[in-house]
Amino acid sequence: MSDLPIPPASADAHALLLQHHPPALASTLLHEKIHNKPLALHPSHPAPAPNARDSRQRNRHTSSSSSTTTTSRPKPLTALEKRSLRVHAPRLSSLRYGTFLPLKALWVEYAQSLVAMGGGADAMAQRLAAGDLHGAEVEVVRCRCVDRVGIVGVVVKETKGVLVVVCEKGGGKTVPKEFTVFRVRIPPTADEKARYNRRDMVLDLHGQQMMFRAAERAGRKFKPKPMLEL
Amino acid sequence: MPSPKCFVSLVKPPAKRKPFVNAFNHRIDLLLPTDVYDIISQSLLSCPSLAAPPVYHRLVMPLGEILEPTFFNTHIKSGNILLLSRGRLDVENIICLSDGVLRMNLDTETYERAGLQGQPAKCGNGSGAMKRRRFVVELNLRSPSYLTGSKSFNRLKRACENVLNQPQVFLFADLSPSKLSSSGSGSSAADSAAAIPEIITKFPVRTPVPVVETFTDVRIPAFRAPTNSRPHGGGKSEEANYNRGIWRDWVMEIHEYLSLLLLPSGPADRLRATTSVDPYLSTYAVDDELESPSTVTKLQLVGLIPAKWAEAFWENMERLLESLTEEKPETVWAAMVIHGFDDVPFEPTGKQRAGLDACGNAYSILKLPGEGGAMTWEIVGGGNE
């Protein structure tokens, strides 16, 4: 390749090569390794002011390499983002007991109807264990974390691991279900009380065995289970 | 299995003896040579301590009664009482109150239901299924956070109503200074009667009455340490070791002698002058005994005896002994043995005691004849055998 003419644009490069190599080798090196090979440089700093032509070229490239679809719907939030927005968090300080009294009365009727269905101890137990707790007045009666014992309130929200209750003084408390026993009382109907002088039915619900979301628990078949510890 | 420990100390005046502090004691035995006892008996029985013996009550009540306003204000906030419930350590729940601090040793279920903040007990918990067996709750009822109606008070009240609500047998002793010093002057009696809570008036006052027994013909040691023996010091030579060793042996022999005198069925046969036994069966002999056996008197008090009363009693007795004109000073000695209650879950300092330490602490003092000083043995720990 040493006989090819030196392109005028690479004259300086050729002169540099000639300082270190014999002419034949310099010509070969120029044509094979340097001429027409792109040389990457660091971008100049500060960046050069964009001229109109460059801007147009850049826009053309980016718009063609963007997403294949043309829709621009917002992406769904990730779980982390959801939690940080705290949309679903119960605003405990703003809960008022009075707001939930009608719900409490409703639950009492519901519970009394569950009891009235009768059917024997096993069927009753299954019904009550799977029964909904929203609106029930619940008391923490035993807990491995001892400070929670004595919390009394109406259930406002039930999640997989937690019961949120609103206390009579106002304000809500989040009580984890783990290692906790909740006591629920179902008062007798007026009729039962008058006729048989029946007292409250008292249930102790072991939170440890109820670690399901309310909807899941409603359909769950609870099997009898030996239990050593809470 | 932790074995009981015995701490011995010998104190010669003017050094002061460490005071005795075990809160709950149920028996005091005082041993004296009979001739000494005869001389001082009148003044001893009428000395200030015995004139106002440590009275106590056996109450049957649920724990919540101590939160009633009269009881709470009279005895817990202003007075000083001792309260101990009956039960076997680490098996049943035990409640004790001394110096205004309520301490409870509870099993898991009671603790988790009560809702009172406490800690896992130092002993009694293992691994796996035994991880959370016993808990210990300590509440300082004298602190200002326990006023009727306050949060902590209400928590305790709730626990007493829901969980600790069975009537239990308690031993109760009122230690307030007005009680101890008043000997029934009219106005103070009226004042104290007005403030006595109703629950206490339902149960009769029990007064321990000193029971005096005389043992005749008993061999008595001279209570002299072997020559050259010393409690500590003297160097590292073989001889010094030997001197220290024989002092320790002597001390334990004396303690054994005192225990043999105090056996429930009377002094042991080996101590009787008329003993004769085949050495194949027993080689016990009272070391260094006085020439002729003589008589010993035992004065016994059973009840709920506070530490301060026992101290005052001993001091009175020491004073009386000092005031004797002694013809034969080497025969003047006196010993007192105090038996602590079994199954007390806490030392007075608040340190926990384990189920294997169920046996009560025992504390013995011996005033050695002459210038010997006072020797004390403190036995701590040890299970029920």
Image (tube, coloured by chain):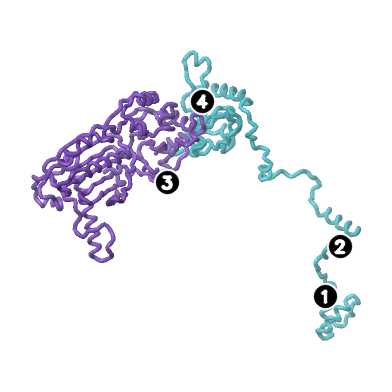
CA–CA distance in space, label 4 to label 1: 91 Å
Q: Which mark is residue B128?
A: 3
Q: Chain of mark 2?
A: A
CA–CA distance in space, label 3 to label 4: 34 Å
Mark whose residue sits in front, 2 or 3:
2
Between residues B371 and A111, which one lies in front from this camera angle?
B371
Mark whose residue sits in front, 4 or 1:
4
Question: 10 Å neighbourhood of mark 3: few (<14), some, or many (≥20)?
Answer: few
Residue A74, x across and y down, in percent: 76, 44
Q: Residue at x 31, y 46 (%)?
A: B381
Where disc 3 sits, the SS reads helix
Where disc 4 sits, the SS reads strand
Q: Earlier in the sequence, mark 4 or mark 1?
A: 1
Q: Amino acid at mark 1?
A: Ile
B287 to A229, vertically: above or below: below
Q: Earlier in the sequence, mark 4 or mark 2?
A: 2
Q: Which mark is residue A214?
A: none
Q: Amino acid at mark 4?
A: Arg
Q: Chain of mark 3?
A: B
Give the left or right position of residue A16, taking residue A194 as reference. right
Q: Does label 2 lie on the same chain as label 4?
A: yes
CA–CA distance in space, label 2 to label 1: 27 Å
Q: Which mark is residue A34?
A: 1
Q: Colour of chain A?
A: cyan
Among the chains, which one is purple?
B
Q: Which residue is mark 4?
A: A185
CA–CA distance in space, label 2 to label 3: 72 Å
Mark whose residue sits in front, 2 or 1:
2
CA–CA distance in space, label 4 to label 2: 78 Å
Q: Is residue B124 visible?
A: no
